[in-house]
Structures are given as structure tokens and as C-alpha cells.
Image (cartoon, rainbow, N blue to C red):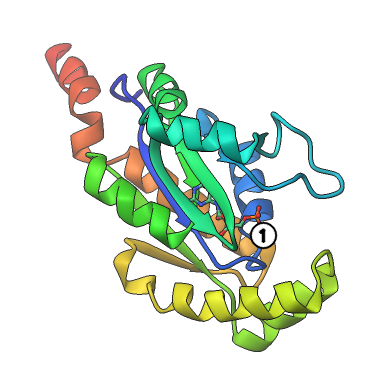
Amino acid sequence: MSSNRGLLFIVSAPSGAGKTTLVDRLVEQVRGLRISRSYTSRTPREGETDGVDYNFVSRARFEAMIARNDFLEWADVFGNLYGTCASDTEQLLAAGDDVVLVIDVQGARQVRQRAGVLTTVFVMPPSFDILEHRLRSRSKDSEDAIRRRLQVAGHEVAAFSEYDFIVVNDELTAAVDRLRSIVLAERARLTHMRGDVEAIVRTF
Ligand code: 5GP
């Protein structure tokens, strides 16, 4: 029971804050919520699959997409390009799906300027020490890369006040519950429900 067009959500978090696991759990639990798969010029990590984790494309292809204005937003993160394809997202929204973009702070700023109705969530790690521990235990990256990610994380967490909602990822299940509550509350807003509710009122 909702108006036809889907709602748009953004989830941002510093790398290592656990947002991928969180958002994967979220879309498993909430029917009608889809992740818009990003494009990236970075090479796949072990265990990542093209067309599942990302659309992995060459830098040249990514730059051609920028030139064609294909992206709703794009950003250079850690020297690689990442972007959200505008028509992919639009197709999902037009079909009535709610869509979540898992993008960085720079991308979120661009979408805020371009998109209409939008709900943004920042996922906070519980502390710097815990983020550092998570990044190291994941140990997919070199020491240099970890240091760089921690430095960027400092700038990202400082942008928390640009977001509508904050979820501290202290414990996975509790954090997923909080994220789910945000999505469900946004779905219940009068602005979103008005059409359906007017139809109910007309039956009286
Ligand atoms: P990773 O390489 O670890 O998968 O992602 C690195 C960073 O890029 C993360 O902060 C992630 O949120 C961000 N990212 C992933 N996809 C996109 C995208 O489409 N646009 C933007 N702006 N950032 C993205």
C-alpha cells in the first residue's frame, strides 16, 4: 500500500564500518527494497563477482559514461572511480521499488542536489579503535591502504550532520533493526501514503 513511485535512500559509512553487510541484511528483510548496483573502475577483490557486487568496468568505459552524463553521481574514492547509473536507479524507482544507494559522502552530496525526495543515513562505527580493528582483521588491504582508509574515515565521520539519520553499528542485528525502522517509517509518511489513503477514505 504505497504510491507507485519508490523511495530513494542513501547509506554512507567509512570503509570498514560494516555497511555492506548491514545493507545486505536490510534488503533480505525488507520486501520491495533494492540496492542499485554501482559501477566502478577498480579491479574486483577476491570473492567479488561482476554484476553482483559491482559492475566492474575499465577506467576508459567509466570516463565515457561520465562524458555521456550517465551517472546520477560519481566520485573518485581511494583513486578509483565509483558511480550510480541514473537510468538503473530510475528504472527501479519507476517500477515502484524502494532503492538504496550505498555511496560515499561526496556522492551523497551530489544526489542531494539533484534528487527530489531522499532519505539519507550515516552508519557510524562505534569508535576509531573499533574501525581500525575491523579494517585490520579484514586484512584484504596493505598497511598503506589501511592508513589511507583511516585518514579518509576521519573526514567522512565529520560529515555526519549532513545526514537525516545516524545508525551506530555497534552490534549487527540491532543496527539492522534500526535501519529497517527508518525505511518503514519513511514508507508510512503522509506524503508517501496520501494517494492510497485517499482511496481508503473514498470507500467510507
Ligand atoms: P569499496 O572499494 O571498499 O567497495 O568501496 C569504497 C568506497 O566507495 C565506499 O565508501 C563505498 O561506499 C563507495 N562507493 C561504492 N559505490 C559507490 C558509488 O556508486 N558512488 C560513490 N560516490 N561511492 C561509492
**Front-most of residues 173 and 46:** 46
Q: Quadrant of residue 105?
A: bottom left
Examine the rendering and report whether any part of residue 35 can be seen. no
**Front-most of residues 123 and 4:** 123
Q: Which quadrant would the N terminus be assigned to in this image?
A: top left
For label 1, the residue is 173
Q: Quadrant of residue 127?
A: bottom right
Q: Is residue 57 left or right of residue 92?
A: right
Query: Vertically, is 197 above or below 161?
Result: above
The image shows residue 24 at horizontal and vertical percentages of: 65, 45
Q: Is residue 35 left or right of residue 109?
A: right
The image shows residue 177 at horizontal and vertical percentages of: 56, 56
Query: Vertically, is 95 above or below 105?
Result: above
Q: Is residue 50 left or right of residue 167?
A: right
The image shows residue 27 at horizontal and vertical percentages of: 59, 39
Find numbered disc 1 in the image and state the secondary structure of the residue it sits on: helix
Query: Vertically, is 189 above or below 1?
Result: below
Residue drawn at x 77%, y 44% is: 44
Q: Which quadrant would the C terminus be assigned to in this image?
A: top left
